[in-house]
Amino acid sequence: MLCDLIIDGNYILSRLVFTLHKNNLLFGALHKSLENAISNYRKWYPFANIYLVSDSKEKSWRKQLTKGYKATRKKDSDIDWNFVYTAYGEFKESLTGIRVLEAPHIEGDDWISFLCHKANSEGRSTIIVSNDYDIKQIVRFSLEPLWINIMSNEMYNKEKLFMPKNYQLFINKVSKLSNDDIFNLNDNSYFLKLMDRFLTKYEIFEIDSTESLIIKLISGDKSDNIGSAWSQTKNGKKRGIGEKGAKTIYDEYLKEFGEINIEDPDLYENIADLICERKKLSKTQIESIVENLIDNVKLIDLRLENLPEEIITKMEQKYNG
């Protein structure tokens, strides 16, 4: 089983920086801590390719769509970020056997989507190390051709593994192929051992990638300052649709229409109609809710076909360069 490892550099950097800063070890241990983290990930499996991706230093292309994108994020002023980014740059330059991928105006999320698409189209699975929940859109699997995308992270000393819904079907298929290979000429058995270690050791979350995307489109993303598909200001406070409310609307959609086809031209209008019914809004608001949903698609949807053509071209050029 050929598998690529994709490491979200922003995730490992921030996780280590805050831990080291808390223990007054930042200036003496950052570089070594980064090395140890990468070394531990590499030991998981004989990966076909290993990538470290990071956000661009330049403003994201999404800022061109809305100036408010990620505008509410604040850095801890007690941390010497100049030192952090200088040390991180030196660390990236020191890496061997790992491709570091960055490009102007491109976010790490974009790279992860691009690399997963590239791997999957060539029949390779991916293990993504990240705590960015937008990546749940990419956590899925295929039985023909055979591949799976998995996300792993460690937060608050809890190791978490995000597996696609019904992932056991994939495990069963790999297990059958391993049993049929009497000469053990493939790595399927070794991959199964890796999955067994993960499933035994980690806290497991089953992910429906379509559900994750739709809920995000409806509820928005507070951490990125992306509003929900509908909101109102009452008593001086702006209120919208949270994840729980978005999940309810998603379930109501399934109950009424049976399934969600992300390519359905009526999808957003149907979602807007359900929002109006649930919030007891006038049907005249459907159009504005649809516009908000479409705006959120541009900011949130990581499907490669949703990314701007010029961004995909830049990634292709960097990847092939």
Image (cartoon, helix red, strand yellow):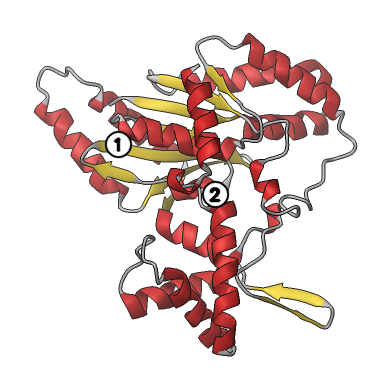
Q: Farthest front residue?
A: 310
Q: Look at mark 1 in the image and give the residue it sits on.
A: 147
Q: Farthest right residue?
A: 78
What's the amino acid at mark 2?
Asp
Image coords of residue 155 (percent x, y) = 62, 42
Q: Which mark is residue 62?
A: none
Nearest to the observer: residue 163 or residue 300: 300
Image coords of residue 321 (percent x, y) = 50, 16
Residue at screen point 37% across, 60% down: 263
SS class, disc 1: strand
6 w.r.t. 278: above or below: above
Image coords of residue 140 (percent x, y) = 37, 46
Q: Quadrant of residue 100?
A: top right
Q: Look at mark 2 in the image and give the residue it sits on.
A: 134
Image coords of residue 229 (percent x, y) = 60, 70
Residue at screen point 54% across, 72% down: 290
Is 156 on the left or on the right of 84, as rendered? left
Counting residues from the N terminus, which is met first, the one under dot 2 or under dot 1? 2
What's the amino acid at mark 1?
Trp
**How many other residues sit within 10 Å of disc 2, few (<14), some (14-19) or many (≥20)?**
some
What quarter of the picture does the N terminus occupy? top left
Marks 2 & 1, CB-CB < 8 Å contact = no
39 w.r.t. 126: above or below: above
Nearest to the observer: residue 21 or residue 291: 291
